[in-house]
Image: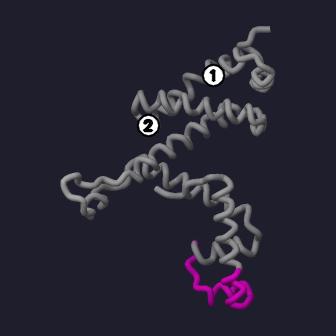
Amino acid sequence: MSLAVVAESELIRNYLNGDHSSLQTLVERHRSRLYSYIMLLVKDKQLADDVFQDTYVKVINTLKQGTYKDEGKFIQWVMRIAHNLVIDHFRKLKKVNFVDSRNNEYDIFDSIRFTDPSIEEQLITLQIHQDVKKLLDFLPEEQREVLHLRCYAGLSFKDIAEQTDVSINTALGRMRYALINLRKMIAEKQIVLTV
């Protein structure tokens, strides 16, 4: 049977059993689509090459660790890895501080934004919102409710207590535990929530 028509799950299984040509077949099968997607996001050939390579390094590591769950969506999973790597790249760029080398003092004008958010910043912000929304689904219902009422509806803890028929201290406690649980999940999943 030609490797060109072999199912992705079988290629993955073959690769894990030592057939490195199976991984090469997977890479070649999706090279054009993945690389085009990365180029669309970064608009720089050298950076696109780096992200493409880093994506497959991460794919290989995940496959070897046995944590990949085959759901018949290999290319979507690979594109998500690439997407996250692009976002990580732009986040790192945003953390670089520019300081005038002639003057050791901090200049406020180095960090003031004079333009609207770039496409990269908008992409990062959208990703942050999606990540937080997904994390909220893992909170217990009462914690999720208090967090939603406080952060999204803008209610005071007094109003939250009245609406949920609990004491203010209970509402505060639920919010505290919601934040603690979110921080734990963010740390466990190594999610970066900064622009």
Query: Which one is in front, 72 or 84?
Result: 84
Q: Where is residue 78 in the image (x, y as percent from the top left)?
A: 63, 34
Say which residue appears at 40% left-offset and 32% top-offset: 44
- From the image, tell me which residue sits under label 1: 27
- From the image, tell me which residue sits under label 2: 42
Q: Which colour scheme is used?
A: one colour
Q: In the drawing, does residue 40 fall left or right of residue 71?
A: left
Q: In this view, does 22 lie above or below 45?
A: above
In 3D space, how far apart are the residues under numbered discs 2 and 1 (Cα atoms)? 20 Å
- Magenta run includes residue 37: no
Q: Where is residue 141 in the image (x, y as percent from the top left)?
A: 76, 71
Give the amino acid at mark 1: Val
- Count every numbered label the image shows and give the total: 2
Q: Where is residue 10 in the image (x, y as percent from the top left)?
A: 80, 22
Query: What are the residue bounds of the magenta stretch?
Result: 152-173
Residues at circles 2 and 1 in contact by the CB criterion of under 8 Å: no
The image quadrant of residue 45 is top left
Q: How crowded is mark 1: few (under 14 residues within 10 Å), some or many (20 or more)?
A: some
SS assignment at label 1: helix
The residue lying furthest to the left in this view is 102
Give the amino acid at mark 2: Val
| Figure quadrant of the N terminus | top right
Examine the rendering and report whether any part of residue 162 can be seen: no
- Magenta run includes residue 161: yes
Say which residue appears at 64% left-offset and 20% top-offset: 29
Q: In the drawing, does residue 52 fall left or right of residue 61?
A: left
Q: Is residue 164 above or below residue 56?
A: below
Examine the rendering and report whether any part of residue 152 can be seen: yes
Query: Which one is in front, 6 or 88?
Result: 88
Q: Position of residue 147 (x, y in %)?
A: 64, 73
